[in-house]
Amino acid sequence: MSLATVTEARAEAHSEPDCSGFEHLPGLPTGGRDTFEFELDLRHAGPRRVQLRVEWVGSPKLPAVWVAGGISAHRHACANTLDTSIGWWQELIGAGQSLDPSKFCLLACDWVGADGDLDLPISSADQADAIAQAVELLGIRRLHAFVGASYGGMVGQAFAVRHPQRIERLVCLSAAHRPHPFASAFRALQRQVVALGQLQCADDIGLSLARQFAMLSYRSPEEFGARFDAPAELSGGRARCASEGYLSRCGQSYAERWSATAFLRLSESIDLHAVEPAQIMVPTTLLAVEGDWLASPADIDSFAAGIAAPTEVECIASSFGHDAFLKEPTRINELLARALRSANVPAGVH
Amino acid sequence: MSLATVTEARAEAHSEPDCSGFEHLPGLPTGGRDTFEFELDLRHAGPRRVQLRVEWVGSPKLPAVWVAGGISAHRHACANTLDTSIGWWQELIGAGQSLDPSKFCLLACDWVGADGDLDLPISSADQADAIAQAVELLGIRRLHAFVGASYGGMVGQAFAVRHPQRIERLVCLSAAHRPHPFASAFRALQRQVVALGQLQCADDIGLSLARQFAMLSYRSPEEFGARFDAPAELSGGRARCASEGYLSRCGQSYAERWSATAFLRLSESIDLHAVEPAQIMVPTTLLAVEGDWLASPADIDSFAAGIAAPTEVECIASSFGHDAFLKEPTRINELLARALRSANVPAGVH
């Protein structure tokens, strides 16, 4: 296998190129970035040369925790000295939080396929293998924890199965060992919306609309009932429902940042996910959310029952459904704090 | 108001024109059909000339029960001597069933807008007014009951509010007095899928895909989990989920029978629905289904609480969710039998 490390220029990460002094960024953790290029033997498509773009906060000398979110998450998990913009898990990472950059080196990556260049089936196992390569190239012997939510939880499961020597504990939020058939059906239809857009070179419209459907699966009737409790109005001779403006903005913003190919391949990757729970041999903490039909408490209980290693399951109620890992930071912080200091790691692992 | 009745030739209803003898159709109830044309003052679009196509089984001398289903239901509720094909409520109507053509004259109609010719906002109140006109033209003084499910339940509510002198009791299945904001959001996105198809004159693809999304809202994760419990497979370099063939057939079959305009205007009509429960003054029976998020038990309870007349609510569990009124005939039969013989009609109404 041919390996190469490409260190990016720091300037690339800044919108203000000469804003380099820490004195301007008093509370921000120190950030680092690297892009690794290597050959990856894709499960469904064979060997391909890929790049993995990684960002971290906290000293690389601290215990390493890999954090991973949904298919639209990326390497920028929190604001830092390299990139001061808000990250996708901003509220969970910081001084005093469970994911404290003074205690852990917190790493995240752009998913393989997120740039849209790889129009091939990509599996959660491929993501796990790519992360394992990056972990090795970064000189990290073993992750203190892999903390993954949604698709990131599936990738964490695959990492635990395929690279057990590189992980001490798995924290898996809102993800079961296999997709639910109803959720798969819903994602398959979203992908057909994208394909319908592509038919007429309206990729952005199709992608925006698919994302809006996806948003509904990430949230709950309870939340929408509270937020959009106004009757539909007629506008231009058509009914316009109270949530349409919000959803449209979500979809457009997504379509500006993502390509149709990336969405199709990462959405599909969720449906191709399959892990044998008994092959997870590291202590595991699972989170389930009542009302999340993408990763239902029943499916997560079934997953937990199959894991051979010590496993804890916490089930919470949240009107945010599948998005609780993003929208319930207090609850998630408590769970992560317990999981990361958990003493149920088998003796001799450290 | 100008009124005209257009009686259709019986031959139109037959696929086999010379299959006219009752001896060939031993168990089928006698069917009748009529098409009424009149001016209807549409709530959102003003006066329009419309046609209402009605079909019935049972003698017009029997107590009349109007039956109405979802936006894709139509006047052919059950096989009869005029049309021997299976109807949309086949299992509920027949000898020994709650809707027995030897005891009731059971009437149904094609929705106003179902032919796709009326590209205007159509409200549940418009449907109720059209049905009231047909009831008058048919010489029916008063309906023994209006039995409506889903959109048909909304129309039944509007009928009870707007034409109380023409209805003795309302049976409303899986419909609340207003749409839920989350369900409205989901339907609004379905309409955008149709619009995306129309952009490239691929009405059928958009309509099929919108129907497939709708199917998911009519069913439940429980049902899909049991029916499509197989992992996704790669086919032509793409993941194909176990339910995709089924959904695709549902969508295609729908697109062959319906127009984009009809779908858009009837879907929209659900989102424009609004009835003040306190204005329902007739005895009412409601059905709610656990797990139906289009018409949740909470919303139906809230609806029931506002009705001034005697009201009964039954809540059942069904893995079919919103489609329980079609897929749980035994339970629905029991409920309808009780509701139709109910003694809680105020004295003096008959």
Image: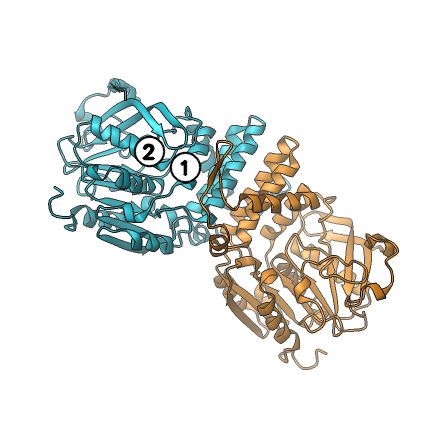
Chain colours: A orange, B cyan
Tell me which residue sits at (25%, 28%) in the image: B134
* Towards the viewer: B166 or A255: B166
* Labels 2 and 1 touching (C-beta < 8 A): yes
Q: Position of residue A255 (x, y in %)?
A: 66, 43
Say what secondary structure mark 1 lies in: helix
Q: Name the residue under label 1.
A: B269
**Badge 2: chain ID:** B
Q: Earlier in the sequence, mark 2 or mark 1?
A: 2
Placement of the N terminus of chain A among the 4 image quadrants = bottom right
Mark 2 and mark 1, same subunit?
A: yes
Identify which residue, A29 or A188, lies in the foreground. A29
Give how far across and how far down residue B28 sits, in percent.
20, 32
Q: Residues within 10 Å of mark 2 (few under 14, many from 20)?
A: many
- Label 2 to label 1: alpha-carbon separation: 10 Å
Indicate the chain on which mark 1 is placed.
B
Is A172 displayed left or right of A292 in the figure?
Answer: right
**One can see residue A162 in this view:** no
Disc 2 residue type (three-letter): Gln
Quarter holding residue B265: top left
Disc 1 residue type? Answer: Ser
> Would you identify the image quadrant in which residue A93 lies?
bottom right
| Depth check, front residue: B85 or B156 | B156
Task: Give the crowd class for mark 1: few <14, some 14-19, many >=20 residues within 10 Å.
Answer: many
Left or right of A86, for residue B283? left
Coordinates of residue B157 in the picture (x, y in percent): 30, 42
Query: Is residue A60 among the parts visible in the rendering?
Result: yes
Residue at the disc numbered 2: B127
Q: Where does residue B336 sit, x and y in percent of width and height?
A: 23, 47
